[in-house]
Amino acid sequence: MAVEIITKEDLNQFRLQLLEDLKQFISPVQSKPTKQWLKTSEVRKLLGISIGTLQNLRIGGKLRASKIGGIHYHWFEDIDRLMNSGRA
């Protein structure tokens, strides 16, 4: 059986790589879109929900939307507020 010695530098490199991997895993959830208004498809992708769930959020008054030319647009700040409130 071969014995490997792990140094503090090895552990530090492992820690840095682990932190970077965690940031990449978490960042899509926490990243703020560059646009203030999002289309329905963008909101569904961001939240990972179905079109029916999104419609229920609109109907229930939990998420406001503006309909322009047949397309619903949602304000990112409303989505952020909804996610931070813990109610969905």
Image (cartoon, grey):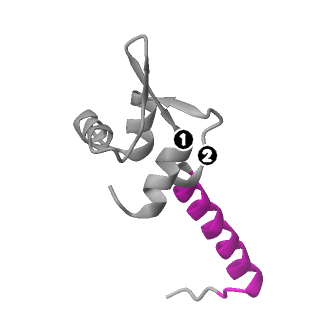
54 magenta-colored: no
Above or below for 54 versus 24: above
Q: Looking at this view, is 81 or 39 the one in front? A: 81
Which residue has dot 1 on it? 76
Overall secondary structure of the magenta section = helix
Q: Residue furthest top?
A: 69
> Is label 1 or label 2 in front?
1
Distance, label 1 to label 2, CA atoms, is 8 Å
- How packed mark 2 is, by other alpha carbons closer than 10 Å (few <14, some 14-19, many 20 or more), is few
Q: Looking at this view, is 87 or 1 the one in front? A: 87
Q: Which residues are magenta?
A: 5-27
Q: Is residue 59 left or right of residue 48?
A: left
At horizontal 65% and vertical 36% (from top left) the residue drawn is 34
How far across and how far down the image is residue 74, in percent? 47, 33
Which residue has dot 2 on it? 32
At horizontal 50% and vertical 54% (from top left) the residue drawn is 81
What amino acid is found at the position of numbered circle 2 in the picture?
A: Lys
Image quadrant where one finds the C terminus:
bottom left
Q: Secondary structure at mark 1?
A: helix
15 magenta-colored: yes
Above or below for 13 versus 26: below
What amino acid is found at the position of numbered circle 1 in the picture?
A: Phe
How far across and how far down the image is residue 25, in percent? 52, 57
At horizontal 37% and vertical 13% (from top left) the residue drawn is 70
Q: Is residue 62 left or right of residue 59?
A: right
Q: Secondary structure at mark 2?
A: loop
Q: Quadrant of residue 63?
A: top left
